[in-house]
Structure formats: structure tokens, C-alpha cells
Image: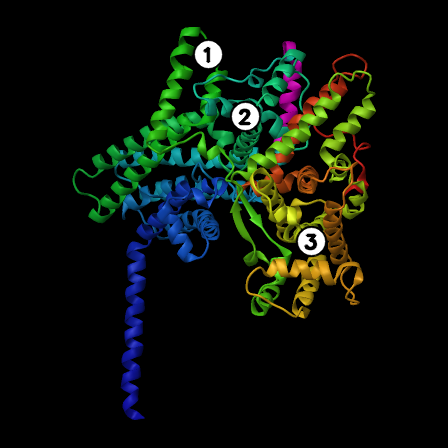
Amino acid sequence: MAGDGWVADIIWHAMILVGKMLVNFWRSWSMEFLLGLSFLMQLVLNLLAGFRWRGASALPRWVIWLCYVGGGASAVLEWTIWLCYVGADYVPKYALGNLSVSGSSGERQLAAFWAPFFLLHLGGPDSITAYQLEDNELSGRSIMEFFLQVVGTLYVIYYVVSGSRALMLATCLMFLVGVAKYVERLLGLHRANLGNLSSSLMGQQRHAGAAAGGRRNHHQRPAFGGVTIDRLMTAHSLFYICKHAFVDSSVEENLDEDAAAEKKKELFSLEAKYLFEVMEMELSLMYDFLYTKAAVIHTSYGYCIRALSPFATAAAFVLVELSNRHDRHRQSDVWTTRVLVAATFILETVSLVRTLGSSWTGFLIYRSRLRPAWIRHQLACKSRWERFRRAVASLGLANVQDHRRWSGNMDQLNMLKLATCGQRQRKEFWAAGSVERCAWNIKIGCLKTLVYKRVEGKVRAFRNELKGKSSYKTKKMLKLAANLRTDRGWRALDRHKLLKLKDYLGPELQLGILTWHIGTDIYLHISDNVKASKGELHKQVEAIRTLSNYMMYLLALRPDMLPGLVTRGLFQLTCEGLHDIWTKSSKHSPINRQEQLARVLHDKWGEGGSGDEINTYLATGIELGRELIKLEKEPDPDRPRDMVKAIFDVWVDMLFHAGYRCSKESHAKRLAHGGELTTIVWLLAEHAGLFIDRKTSKKKGGRRPSNKGNSIQLEKSVLRPNEG
């Protein structure tokens, strides 16, 4: 209709007008928006990046509530950090490019003063340099980008900032700080690369071997006030073992026998929970090394930057105010600059305080070799650092104890629970191609001590087996040390006189996990002994259930944390088989569905009673469950009837084996997500194996071996490839 044309014209012209207004607004305020967005991302990363190791449960309650409403604290936290990590890299680059193109001489000189701040933001916060382990691969492209950003910033400063010496000096100060922080980030990425770390450790090893006596101060444990701080310093003193383990490198043999004996005594004199606490602290240090700037911060370069940066920022603030004595700058730019510089000064000061209050600094203070002695006492006094640390911790800026511990989060996945979920849920589960939404997370809590005691007992048993047996041949001792790291449960079965069950362990670990998960679930749901369990026995039952579900979670969702071939298809096929059995059963109850399915498997599907064909490993798991219940009920004077403890020991052995045979890169990658229990027990095995290997190396010729003799890795001939 003719009357509708003028309406369309009005709408069209209104849209054009609004578009022009938005374009003009963006031209006038784009730099302020980009500057605020870039700074906000830096602030978020400063506040939240550290929770990747500590876990989302350590967040303030109101943040947890917001994340819960948004759908999962951990998922929201990961997405927030990822968005800020990516944005903090791209927003400053875009802003610098925009400044270099749109800036003109004499116009908005304060806007040009902001250019070094974008360079500073590209340097990133102290709390994160890499989001994933692959980000530590420093390429030639990254170096080229660095030079381009520096040249672009110099271009903006040269052509825009003019006519004011004070403003030029302030801009140059912030430019130097920005370049220093950017270089620091690149150095952090370079040093955190596992390949470069391996080369660095080899160089340090050669240097230490050439030193007189080969004594190195960092192998000694400093004594600080407080038991927890003392254990943290122990973790620092043993951190060199952790670094060598992650790069699959040999530990230097430069320690004399007295020092090695002291290390061994120090490590194995700790109680189970404290021994593993030291391992957790070492892994937190490794997280710092791989994913933050810790490798560079705690060097002379890093300390100088943090000491000078707040003063340079404060001086720049004064110089900017002097350049505006005659109101030569736009008022909005002046206030934006004031807020920017003040906020930057606060962040740089907090960075300095956190650095000085960190355990890395405390350990360096202990190792200081300042001369003369009175200077060392004044500048590197342990008691003064301890008082300073407590003051910093009271302000909430740093807590060198709590955030060093493992979060204790263990993901869980249960096949019987998956099979008995509603039909609609199951279709969504397979359609999504992932079981992530069907998994859940628990706190290991008091179960941690129970698991740790068993692992500690496993380590001590091997040490005692070697102790005093000087007649052992080196090859036999190496074989014992290999068993410490490669046993998949057969020793536990042998100890409980249940070797008839060893075939159920399967040819590979993943198949053994699948079989034992089904068999264990059937046993736990049907055994009268389990139902009547109380006290310590009940704790062991819960530990078995937790470990079984945890290992199944690794098999289904984290197969890179397990050795052997990926069996995702077999896992899905077994789940389908369980669900088919569940749907064919006549009675369904809304409660105790898993127990009902376990009874159906035990009563109707054992020994081929149903007449239907089922998955081979599902049938093997059902057979194992029936066998466990049968062995528990049958009296046998030659075999203990503590079936719960036997199953628990088998699962701990599988956990131990999974941790050791997992690739070092996979261990390192999972540190970015809070770490895994398998990584902790693997690290303990590496520490224990170090001293076992030392004992074996002393048998070779009666002399101290070379650096190659004391390898964390055992001889490949001892590690049998068919052990999966």
C-alpha cells in the first residue's frame, strides 16, 4: 500500500541515524572501552586463575552461588578463565592497532599514553601464562608478534605524544615496564616448556657435577616456624625430584651418602597424610612452574621488575599530572588516566607483596649466600620473612599453606548407574557423545587417609624387602623396584591368597578396570558382609566404591590418564549391554535401581543362565562378582576371609599402576585442572624409587655411579611390555 512507504522510510532513516550515532560513539569512546575491557580481564585472571589448582570449591561463597545458578562452578570457572585468557591476548593487540591507525599528532595525547598499558596487559598477570600445556610451545610467531607490538607502541608514542616532556617521560617509563613484563611472559613460557626444562636440568646437572664436592644447597630442608610451613619447605627442597620426574630425566648423583640418607629419613619418617601432603605441595609448585610466571618471577630479573614497577607507575602518575597543569588534556581522558594508573599501581603493589610473601621467596631466603653475614641476616632473615608472610596472609593477599594442598576432588562414574537411568536420559547421554554430564564429583575427605596409608604401606613394604639384603643381585633388586611401579593387582591377590582371580585382571589395565568395576559393584550391592559393615570396614567399603568409580571415570572420560589402547567403544558397548539387561528385567523400582540390576546380573546372568549372548567383558565382570561373593562365603582355613580388604588392595594397586604408566605429559596437563590422585601416587613412587635405585646403583662396582646411573626410570628390560 502507498501509505506504508513513508513508514518504511522513517524506519530506514532511523536505523541509519542510530548506526551513525553508534559509529560516532565508538570512535569517541572505543579506546576507553577497550582499555576498561583489557584491564577487567587482567583483574579477573589475577583473582581467579589460581583456583584452577585449588578447585572451584575454594571460591568465595557468593561466586560459587553465581556459578551454581549458571550451571556448575567448575565449568563456569573454566570458561571464564579461558575467555579472559584469550581476550587478554587479542583485545590489547586490537587496541594498539587501532591507536596506530587512528591516532594523529597532537590529538588526545593521553590516549597515546595508554598504549604502553596495553603492552603491559600483553605481559599478562603473574597467576597465568599458559591455559594449556601446549601454550608453552613458544614459536617464532610469538617472538615476531612481540617485536611488532613493541614497534607499534613506539610508533604511537613518537607520532602522538609531543610537546610535553613530562608526558613523554611518563610514557617512556610505562613503556619500559610494559616491555619488561612482556619479555617476562615470553621467558616464562620458554622455561615452562618440558623440552626446555629437560635441557636446563641436564645443564644444571653437568654444572653441579663439575663443582667441588658436588654439594648443592637446595637439597637441604630449611627450618621455619610452624609444622605446615616446615613441610612446605620440605616440598621445595625435594622439588628437583619432581621436575626430573616430569621430564623423564635422571636425578643427579652428586648427593653424598649422608645427604641421601638424610633425605630418605626425612621423607619416610612422615605419617601417611603428611607424606602425601608433601607430594601435593610439590605438584602445586609444578603447577606454578608450568602455568604461571613462577619460573621467572623468583629470579633476580623478576624481583627487580616487581620492585621497580610500582615506583615507575607512581612516577608516571605524577608526571601526567604535571603535564596537565594548564588543562591541556580533555577532562574525560584525564580521569580515565587517573583511574587506570591508580588501578595499575595497586595491582603492581599487590604483585610485589604476593611475591615477597610466597613460599618460593621463603625458600630462596634460606638458600641466600649473601656476604658478609650481617648483610645476610638483615636482608634474608627467616624470622622476619615469617612475620611478613603472616601479615600478608592476614590481609588475604597470600596464603602459602592452604592453596598448596590438593583440592581432593575426585570425579566419579558408575556403569550400573548409567544403565539404570531413565530412557530419555540415556538417549541424551549417547546422542551427546559424552558421559560428562552423567559424572559427578565428590570430596575424597577422610577416605584420602585410608588410600594414602595403603599406598604408603606398599612403598614401605618394598623398601623393607630391600633393606639389609646385601646379597641381592642388582637385577633382582631392579625387578623388585619395577614391581613397585608396574604391579596391577596380582601381588595383592597373592598376599590374600586369591591368585585364582588374577586372570580377571585382564591383559591390559583398561580391560581390568572394566571387569573389576562390574564385579566390584555386584559384590558391594549383594554381600551381606558389606551391608553389615561399620567403622573402619565401612570406610574401606566407601573407599572401594570411590576408587572403582574414579578409575571408571578415567577410563571413560580421561583415557589419556591410563596406559594401553583407548577402549571407549568397548565401554559404550558394555553400557548398552547393561541397559539391555536392565530393560529386560521384569521389576523396576524407583529406589535402589543399582542394587536391583546387581541382583539381576548375579542371579539370572551368571554362568550363562539367561541363555542370551552378552559382551565378553561384561560376562567376565559378572563372573568375577559371583566369584567374589562365593569366595567370601566359602570357609577356607588357608585363606583369610577379609574380601573387602583384598578388593581394596587390588584397586589401590591399579591406581598405583595407572599413575606410573601414564605419560608425563598427561600428568602435566591435568595439573591445569586441579590434578589427579593418580599423579600424586605416581610422584610418591618416583621419590621412593629414587632411593631404591640408589641402593641398586651401589652394587655396581662398589663406586659411586655417574649421573646416568641414578635414573628415575628403571632399565627398560625390567619393565615388561605385556603388563599393560
Q: Is residue 639 magenta?
A: no
Residue 263 in percent (x, y) is at 61, 18
Residue with the mark numbered 2: 235
CA gap between label 1 and label 3 equals: 62 Å
Residue with the mark numbered 3: 518
**Residue 704 lies in quadrant:** top right
| Dominant SS in magenta | helix
Residue 415 in percent (x, y) is at 64, 57
What secondary structure is marked by label 2?
helix
**Amino acid type assigned to the residue bearing label 3 in the image:** Ile
From the viewer's perspective, is residue 520 above or below residue 677?
below
CA gap between label 3 and label 2 equals: 39 Å
**Amino acid type assigned to the residue bearing label 1 in the image:** Leu
CA gap between label 1 and label 2 equals: 24 Å
What secondary structure is marked by label 3?
helix
Q: Earlier in the sequence, mark 1 or mark 3?
A: 1
Residue with the mark numbered 1: 370
Q: Earlier in the sequence, mark 3 or mark 2?
A: 2
Q: Work out whether residue 557 or residue 424 is closer to the camera in this orientation and state it.
A: 424
